[in-house]
């Protein structure tokens, strides 16, 4: 199942970045605000991943209407809706924004009862993906910092040894 494989990959990425940041903290290295946020909220994300696996069974997910039935990998309508609201709001959601978005969608193409039932889990799935993307950026920034520190250390070593 595409959505569960993707969720598993994202959960592994989040756990790896979490461990990397936790290791930084244990070594006394500085951590970015986004890294601190991940440290503080990782347990909540982990709980939501478990919730998605429980509340959105594979068989049920397969039956959700697709945007364009192009095969098993095509996106469901509620995934498209969730992706649009998360992208539009940069991941900042509140009840009014969610209601407005869903109402606007419903005015054009009403959601089925099954889609409405799956909506919370699909929205969580999309948000986990969004946070996993942010975690990947945190990882790249950490790697860039490490390379910059190494360059500075090499430069300082060259300067202190008298070389130019």
Image: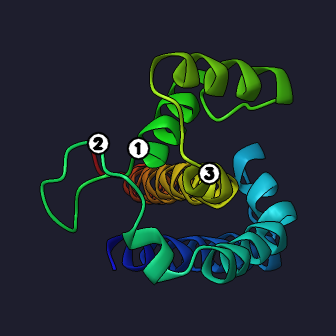
Q: Position of residue 83 (x, y in %)?
A: 47, 39
Picture quarter with the N terminus? bottom left
The residue located at (80%, 55%) in the rendering is 36
Name the residue rendered at 81%, 79% in the picture: 26
Residue at image coords 32%, 73%: 2
The answer, for residue 12, to whether it is visible in the render is yes
First reached walking from the N terminus: tag 3 or tag 2: 2
Q: In terms of secondary structure, where does tag 2 sit?
A: loop
**Residue 127 visible to the viewer:** no
Spot occupied by residue 39 in the image (x, y as percentages of width and height): 80, 65
Q: Nearer the viewer, residue 129 or 162?
A: 129
Instruction: State how far apart marks 3 and 2 are (Cα).
Output: 16 Å
Q: Is residue 115 above or below residue 24?
A: above
Residue 118: quarter of image: bottom right
Which of 22/135 is in front? 135
The residue carrying mark 1 is 77
Residue 143, by quadrant, is bottom left
- Which of disc 2 and disc 1 is earlier in sequence? 2
Furthest residue in direction left, as rendered? 70
Name the residue beneath numbered marker 3. 113
């Amino acid at each position: 199942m595409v959505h569960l494989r993707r969720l598993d990959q994202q959960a592994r990425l989040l756990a790896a970045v979490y461990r990397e940041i936790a290791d930084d903290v244990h070594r006394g290295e500085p951590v970015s605000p986004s890294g601190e946020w991940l440290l503080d909220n990782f347990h909540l994300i982990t709980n939501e991943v478990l919730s998605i696996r429980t509340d959105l069974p594979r068989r049920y997910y397969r039956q959700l209407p697709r945007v364009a039935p192009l095969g098993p990998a095509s996106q469901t309508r509620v995934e498209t809706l969730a992706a649009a609201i998360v992208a539009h709001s940069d991941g900042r959601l509140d009840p009014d924004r969610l209601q407005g978005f869903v109402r606007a969608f419903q005015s054009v193409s009403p959601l089925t009862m099954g889609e409405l039932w799956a909506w919370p889990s699909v929205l969580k799935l999309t948000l986990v993906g969004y946070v996993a993307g942010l975690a990947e950026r945190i990882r790249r920034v950490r790697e860039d910092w490490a390379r910059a520190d190494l360059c500075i250390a090499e430069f300082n070593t060259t300067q202190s040894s008298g070389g130019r």
